[in-house]
Amino acid sequence: MKRIFLGSVLLLGLWAGPGWGADFSLTLNDVSAQGRLNYVFDKNDYGDSFASLRVLYNDDKDTLLGTVSGGVIGEPGNIPGLKIGAEILGNLGSNDHDRSLMTVGLGLLVNYQPAQLQGLGFFGRAQYAPKLLCFLDSEGMFEASIGASYMVTPKATILLEYQNTDVHFENVGSTDIDNSVRAGILFHF
């Protein structure tokens, strides 16, 4: 599983070249790592449209999870530095004891980085997949994360994030497949 994760993160990193205008982040701790590639393909006065790929590996929980998403994010206009977004996510993965999941969920994004904090920002994400849109061994999924960021340069941001991913598996019940605090870096290409 470690080889699959490392290969996937390497592939995501190679895709995030300067010509793409993408963001690539890698966050990790002693037992888990997460790579994320975000590509903005349409910017206008109303906000951005984006596509995102994510690979999560947790050694303690024996979790490998891949996510593909697409959505929009923009500034509401009355609070400088605040961005709010929505996305549709597709998840595919496996957990210990040969439990597999495939879900389609809805997500919300919030990012607050006002100019007066001089590079310091806060963010949060949540996604929910109801039983209706869960397949294989999964019967529901909820994921939430909160974090802080600091823009070191215009091209690099350091991150500290807490994330909890909870999946309801058939005949097993609710299981945390990831419950971690990770630190890392975000590159803006």
Image (cartoon, rainbow, N blue to C red):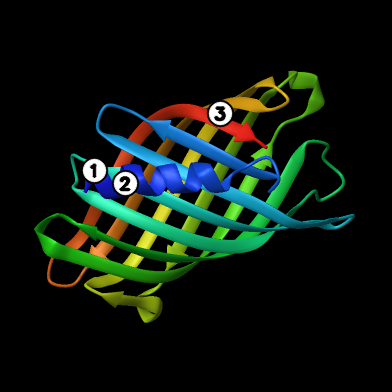
Q: In the displayed image of the protein, which residue is found farthest to the left?
A: 97
Q: Secondary structure at mark 2?
A: helix
The nearer-to-camera label among 3 and 2 is 2
The nearer-to-camera label among 1 and 3 is 1
Q: Which residue is mark 1?
A: 2
- Classify 63 as above or below 100: above
For the residues bearing labels 1 and 2, Cβ distance under 8 angstroms: yes
Number of numbered tags placed on the structure image: 3
Q: Secondary structure at mark 1?
A: helix
**On-image quarter of the C terminus:** top right
**Amino acid on which disc 3 is placed:** Ala
Q: Quadrant of residue 27?
A: top left
Q: Quadrant of residue 137?
A: bottom left
**Amino acid on which disc 2 is placed:** Phe
**Relative to residue 15, is residue 11 drawn left or right?**
left
Q: CA distance from mark 3 to mark 2?
A: 25 Å
- The crowd level at tag 3 (other Cα within 10 Å; few <14, some 14-19, many 20+) is some
